[in-house]
Image (spheres, rainbow, N blue to C red):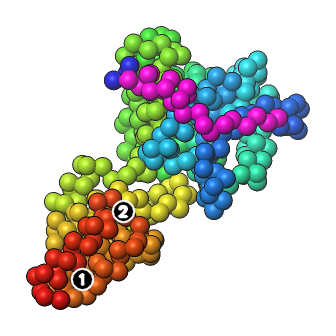
Amino acid sequence: MSKIYLFLAIFFVTTFSNAQAIYKSIDSRMLGQERQIKIQLPRNYDKNPENHYPVILVLDGDYLFEPIAGNVDFFSYWDDIPEAIVVGINQAGSRRADTYADDIQYFPSKSGKNFFDFIGGELFPFINSTYRTTNFNVIAGHDLTANFANFYLFKDRPLFQAYINLSPDLSPQMAGRLYQALGSTGSQKWFYLATASNDVAELKRSIEQLHLQLNTIDNDNLHYTFDNFDKPFHYSLVAHAIPRALEQIFAAYKPINLEEYEELKTDDSSPLAFLNKKYGTIKNLYGVNLPVRLNDFLAVGKAIEHKENWDELEKLGELALKQDPDSMLGSYYMAKSLEERGKTKKAMRMYESAYDKKEAGFITADFMIRKAELIKKDFGY
């Protein structure tokens, strides 16, 4: 499995690079210098001026930006995660200064504090004022920068909701502080932690000890994932970890899968309520206004039909018609509901009314014609 992740990560970067990087220089008052950044906008950014997007900030952007941006582009292309704006900060030659912390409190100090304030006080205001962003922010880093990213968790109102820790070089007291902050968080937080069998030995030991602590946290607001990959080294583990981290952070966004569909068919819950809750969760967590996907309409529709809840199927049809009145989907659900409740003439007319609408999955013009013709044949209309 780890070999597959490595191959895919390389494939993402080399093949799915249609979303072009934008290179900018920010003249920072806090840093007293210009800082180079890279920005990847979603490939459909200009086509969808009404859409807003989460932001993924990549520290060590000189080498970490491309693999993360490539994965984001690939996964969002297949609709497994939302489209996102990826921002990388180049730190070649400055990462030690950028991550500097004092030897007493072990918090960012001097050049480290300046860099910390630059991200929150200059970079994000620039990104938010220039591009269409949501309030969901992710930060990713590797060893020193991964450790540094975690300092944002200790703010009263953290700038980031999700943290990708790729083999973090943990500073003194960091483990205890993370345990306390994540254990007591009153808002949704995602924390991804990764090491590997051939990681730097000292880092690996401290990361595994941190995992033992974090794994005991009982807090419904924390979404925690740990990976200890077999065979990768300190740098190669990055390629394995990135897709895993993105899948974990955006798990709620994914289309309804086969396991969820089978549960919807067999349990006592309302499939329509499940659908409404799912898309409400996507909006509340990620700030993304996502229309209900065809896959999810079809899964929920099949589950409702299996339960023979025809009143609920009618409500699903109303939702589909409201979202896209030009699609056959809503007309089919409305007609099917009418037919099963014995209102055959109305059902026939509803099937016929959809002949010239857009097809949706298995719902084609021929399919709708056959449905209407069968009613005519059976009832002599």
**Picture quadrant of residue 319:** bottom left
- Answer above or below: position of 104 versus 198: below
Q: Position of residue 238 (x, y in %)?
A: 51, 23
Percent across and percent down for residue 256 are: 33, 53
First in residue order: circle 1 vs circle 2: 1
Instruction: Find residue 293 and report its image quarter.
Output: bottom left
Q: Nearer the viewer, residue 78 or 35?
A: 78
* Label 2 SS: loop
Quadrant location, the N terminus:
top left
Answer whether residue 24 is magenta in the image: yes
Q: Is residue 321 above or below residue 209?
A: below
Please check the rendered image and state whether residue 59 is part of the magenta-colored stretch, yes or no: no
> In the drawing, what numbered circle is on residue 360?
2
Residue 336 disc label: none
Q: Which residue is mark 1?
A: 348
Given contact means CB atoms under 8 Å apart, are the residues at marks 1 and 2 in contact? Answer: no
Disc 1 from disc 2: Cα separation = 19 Å
Q: Bounds of the magenta span?
A: 4-25
**On the picture, is 248 further left or further right than 203?**
left
The image shows residue 344 at horizontal and vertical percentages of 19, 85
Residue appearing at x 24%, y 49% in the figure: 259
**Residue type (three-letter) at the residue carrying disc 2:** Ala
Residue found at x 65% / y 44%: 41
Left-right relation of 139 to 223: right
Say if 142 sits above or below 308 in the image: above
What is the three-letter code of the residue carrying label 1? Met
CA neighbours of label 1 inside 10 A, class few (<14), some (14 to 19), many (20+): many
Q: Quadrant of the C terminus?
A: bottom left
